[in-house]
Image: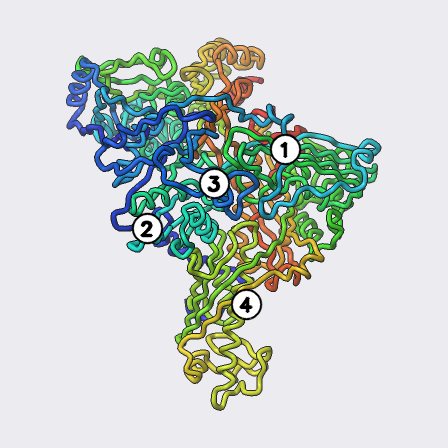
Amino acid sequence: MRGEATRIGDGINRVDGRAKVTGQAKYAAEFEAEGLLHGWVVSSGVAKGKIATLDTSAALAVEGVVHVLTHENRPRLAWFDKSYRDEDAPAGSPFRPLYDDAIVYSGQPVALVVATTLEIARHAASLVRVTYKTEEHETDLAARREKARKARPGKGGYEPPPKPRGNADEALAKAAVKVDAAYESPAEHHNPMEMHATTVVHEPDGALTIYDKTQGVTNTQTYVSNVFGLKPDQVRVISPFVGGAFGSGLRPQYQVFLAVMAAQVLKRSVRVTLTRQQMFTFGYRPATWQRVALGATAEGKLEAVVHEAIGETSRFEDYVEVVVNWSGLLYQCDNARYDYKVAELDVYTPLDMRAPGAVLGLYALESAMDELSYALHMDPLALRLANYTERDQNTDKPFSSKELRACYAQGAARFGWEKRLPTPRAMREGNKLVGWGMATGIWEAMQQKAAARAVLSIDGKLVVGSGTSDIGTGTYTAMTQIAASILGLPIADVTFKLGDTTLPPAPLQGGSWTVASVGTAVKAVCEAVREQVFKLAKKMKGSPLAQASLDEVIFAGGEVRLARDPAQAVSIAAAMRAGEAFTLEEETSTLPQLQEQAKYTRATHSAVFVEVKVDEDLGKVEVTRVVSAIAGGRIVSAKTARSQILGAVVWGIGMALEEETLMDHDLGRFMNHNLAEYHVPVNADVRDIEVIFVPEEDEVVNPLGAKGLGEIGIVGVAAAIANAVFHATGKRVRDLPITLDKLL
Amino acid sequence: MSVSDLRLFEMRRPADLPDVCAVLAERVSRSEPTVLLAGGTDWLVEQETRPAFAKEAALPLVLDVSRLPALRGITLDGDRLRIGAAATYLDMRRDPAVLARAPMLERMGRDIGAIQIQARGTLGGNLATASPAADGVTALAAYDATLVVHSVRGERRIPFASLQTAYKRSTRAADEVIVAVEIDLPPAGSPWIWRKVGTRRAQSISKVALAGVAVREGDRLTRLGLGMASVAPVTALLSRVRTLATSRPLRDLTAADIDAAVDADVSPIDDIRSTRDYRAHCARSVVRAFLRDLGAPV
């Protein structure tokens, strides 16, 4: 694997790919400790009420059972809500496992059985007898919509809806052409392949080493320290690999709490792993109701945008996400009004899931735009172009960059959009109806504070580290690539470390900001090392670079070379030897250029084009072709970037056609809590997906010019599919997923 | 409520069929719970969801029948195909006789779960569980297969039409072991259909599945076998449709008559996998499509 350095933008294989496919990559539940105990969670069988009796005697009688933790015997814990609030907590009182006898949702943990083996813990858990004094619960959003109220802000990154501009309702009433419809979407669960798990190693000195499935080791560290009254330096959190998370690992989940509590009580190492069913007992994408009303002139100029949304939340926290704000940002319109409310239900608090808010808001908005295009007898793409905006009207700021027009043009060209027949049901292939639909996508381009450390050894090996995570996104690969490119090293000579609180801190991996934030820190720290190397190379006796400045040299092949005459070069090893530096070390923290960034709205954009074929007899929909054109700034790692978009499009197919967590409202409990009945697309559902990255330069977003790709790929996909289904069948389905029965 | 309780089971691998029958007869006479385990694809899932055993209840004895020679193998004798109860779906998919003479079984086998499930799951298990959503049972219904069962009393043959009595109930006695199924095959090249409708294109439990085999002579069907999954408490045999479609020339069949017969033959319900209305519509639609393919003007 030795050779020339890769450059930023190249498509390389995942640097951790071999470790993953050979089983060498270790996940939270795979770390061992001496005398490790295993915890098994007992879950509540009712949705609301109080625990009447909790009999653990049969469980305790099983040989090998060490302890059964319940609200009755738990240790003292932090008193105030603020101790339980993690970085991603919304406003309210965070859930406290095993705190008291109150049952606030079905599946709530009510006991943790700790035993010497997983099998014993599991068996003993089946012997714990719990009876409840049940109270009436409410879990149906449709029935509670009238009681929805204004959401309390407080969640990091949440922006309440902007104030209205103009008079949207009046403009709507007067508009020549209008559409006004409600759109519904169900609860969805993240369902990463790896179940949530935590292995807590109780060190001899009482410190804890915690292997956790998390999107942010610092978040877990802070949470555990606060809740259990430990000093942060007694809590080391490690998470080298995460088997998918999609937002489910943003907040510390109850398994980490229970594992730490058991370890603290027993002074032993403890592991707690959730079952697939228990993966349905915490956060999820909230069931959401939306209304979008659009008014336009007969020529298709938008005159009014009204976007209202109601999302479900728990009784104890106000989960909020940006659902409606996008509607006044994406298109030119002088009259806009937004409303966003939450309805409290007897459920657990929802949780960010890939492109939280946007994926729902854009489903409704882009469906409504499609409906408007038919009302206007206008091509759906032409309607978007007629209302294209170069400014964010919500904030009255320009975009730092916006190559959405190029997304439309290149996506449409690749898809062959101009051959589309405008009338629904006009395109056929054999006994199948063919439909073409499109939609726009948008997501914020954010940057957070982040830090990184780099150590270059005299043997030419570079180790860079930052406490970020890689939830399958390709962080290891992208960061390795950035570091290698700056120091001109082969990929094989660069190691990137992450997922450890002993590394310089990084933000939670969310919001699509990891490359922008951590990548910027990695770039900066490697540039600092580069400067040190250059100084040593310059100082060497007889150095051919003695007169050169840093911008006159290139780093390549383990050498510092004069750009205008690459034969004039000093090897990095020689320079370090001469300077008697066996290692060069730098640590850097980078902040976003807030003042400059504040002048602009920063966003990624996409245009998604979809072909569906519908069996009219049975309502079966096949998504036969997807073209996703993305404007995401500079692409750092082409192959993992493409994979991000591919995966997101597949999820969009699932969202449009298959995914929903079905609640039995009589029981207040999710019914299809397994991967057999919670349907995600299988291979056979996925056909041609083409990804286009539109060139986009942006010096405002961050020094790398990368905008982030984690969320944008899914935004708009469900709308494009729903629009294609309408084009094929003439049937507009306004509640997801579009299952076969809805198309009859 | 978990697989961990398996550690409390006694498990045995009987030497041969008489041994299985003897153990089963003895335990059944004493009302002791006994499980015949082949692929385990249904039974293991059930263990995750059933309540824990009460302390006083006797522990089940699990008899592993998956390797019994008497239950394995697929043989073709003239026009009679015999499939051992412990033959897996993958065995069927790869068997030359099945491929040549019963292609519908091969096609159905592809739709069973994932390849790993196809490598473990067996037709015998599918019949023992007798779920109305079972794809394998649906295919056997269309072939009007005969169940061969053994007990200490000897061999008994159960025609498919008299097998299922109610939801997951059958006329097989508790001490009878399913040994094989036998199918009297239609001539090679006869028309058939396997049509499974689910939420996604693989690995989903049927909203509706139709299995059909037919023999056509001129404008008449001289044999029509149908089975339909997930539209009634038991596998639907669509007897009215069979009678209708074989009672007159294909050209005299009308969509209205077919639809009425289907409606009378099925009694679908709403559940988490689909709706009653969709299933009823789908049932009519796939039956009409098959008869259309056979030559009916519908």
Near mark 2 (Cα within 10 A), the count class, few <14, some 14-19 or many ≥20, is: many
Q: Is residue A481 left or right of residue A278?
A: right
* Amino acid type, residue under disc 2 in the picture: Val
Q: Is residue A394 left or right of residue A183?
A: right
**Is there one chain holding both mark 2 and mark 3?**
yes
**Is there one chain holding both mark 2 and mark 4?**
yes
* Amino acid type, residue under disc 3 in the picture: Asn
Residue A198, visible in the rendered structure: yes
The tag earlier along the polypeptide, 2 or 4, is 2
- How far apart are the alpha carbons under marks 4 and 3? 41 Å
Mark seen at residue A683: 3
Badge 3 marks a residue whose secondary structure is helix
* Amino acid type, residue under disc 4 in the picture: Ala
Relative vertical location of residue A10 with respect to residue A93 in this rendering, above or below: below
**Is there one chain holding both mark 1 and mark 3?**
yes
Nearer to us of marks 4 and 3 is: 4
The tag earlier along the polypeptide, 1 or 3, is 1
Residue A246, visible in the rendered structure: no
The tag earlier along the polypeptide, 2 or 1, is 2
Q: Residue at x 44, y 28 (%)?
A: B205
Quadrant of residue B115 within the rendered picture: top left
Rendering coords of residue A209 (x, y %):
36, 53
**Is there one chain holding both mark 2 and mark 1?**
yes
Mark seen at residue A201: 2
- How far apart are the alpha carbons under marks 2 and 3? 39 Å
B243, A684: nearer the viewer: A684
The tag earlier along the polypeptide, 2 or 3, is 2
Q: Are marks 2 and 1 in contact (CB under 8 Å)?
A: no
Near mark 3 (Cα within 10 A), the count class, few <14, some 14-19 or many ≥20, is: few
The quadrant of the image that shows the C terminus of chain A is top right
